[in-house]
Amino acid sequence: MEDRKANLLITMVFDKDSDIRKQINTELELKDEITKDLQHLITGKEIKHFAIADDEVINKKLTQEYKVGKWDILACDLYMCSKCYAKFTHKFNYCPTCGAEMRGSENGKNN
């Protein structure tokens, strides 16, 4: 059996009027704290390793690998992204999991 991966996403939204240097410092401090806490929390668990990617890495991966997808219809109200295989009960213009832009569905109809 292959290793199973689970993804967590943390989004920080800063006040538009706050100082960009303070925003960056806060972001870096929080990433450091999260990394330290995660290292402590996974000790003795079945987690082999973890990685924290920044927005630049995530956005690059999304735009390079997951440009356009479609909704595969699994059941009456169950749809699966053709790129990352995430399942949803509603269709969106993009996949909330991988960011793929959706252009149609398995039956040939648009979203």
Image: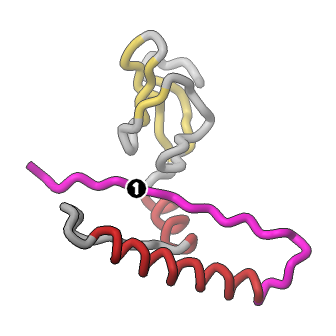
Kindly indicate the quadrant of the structure image that contains residue 10.
bottom right
Q: Nearer the viewer, residue 43 or 5?
A: 43
Q: Position of residue 65 (x, y in %)?
A: 42, 57
**What amino acid is at disc 1?**
Asn
101 relative to 87 in the view: left or right: right
* Magenta stretch bounds: 1-21
Residue in the picture at 47% in, 33% down: 70
Q: Is residue 6 magenta?
A: yes
SS majority, magenta: loop
Colouring used for the render = secondary structure
Q: Position of residue 111 (x, y in %)?
A: 59, 24
Q: SS for tag 1?
A: loop
Residue 2, compared with residue 24, is above or below; it is above
Residue in the picture at 62% in, 62% down: 11
Q: Nearer the viewer, residue 6 or 66?
A: 6
Which residue is farthest left?
1
Question: What residue is shown with label 1?
Answer: 7
Kindly indicate the quadrant of the structure image that contains residue 75.
top left
Which residue is farthest top?
76
Q: Residues within 10 Å of mark 1 (few under 14, many from 20)?
A: few
Residue 101, compared with residue 64, is above or below; it is above
Kindly indicate the quadrant of the structure image that contains residue 81.
top left
Q: Position of residue 43 (x, y in %)?
A: 25, 72
Residue 68, compared with residue 61, is above or below; it is above
Residue in the picture at 53% in, 27% down: 104
Q: Is residue 47 magenta?
A: no
Residue in the picture at 19% in, 61% down: 46
Q: Nearer the viewer, residue 99 or 69?
A: 99
Q: Position of residue 57 (x, y in %)?
A: 49, 72
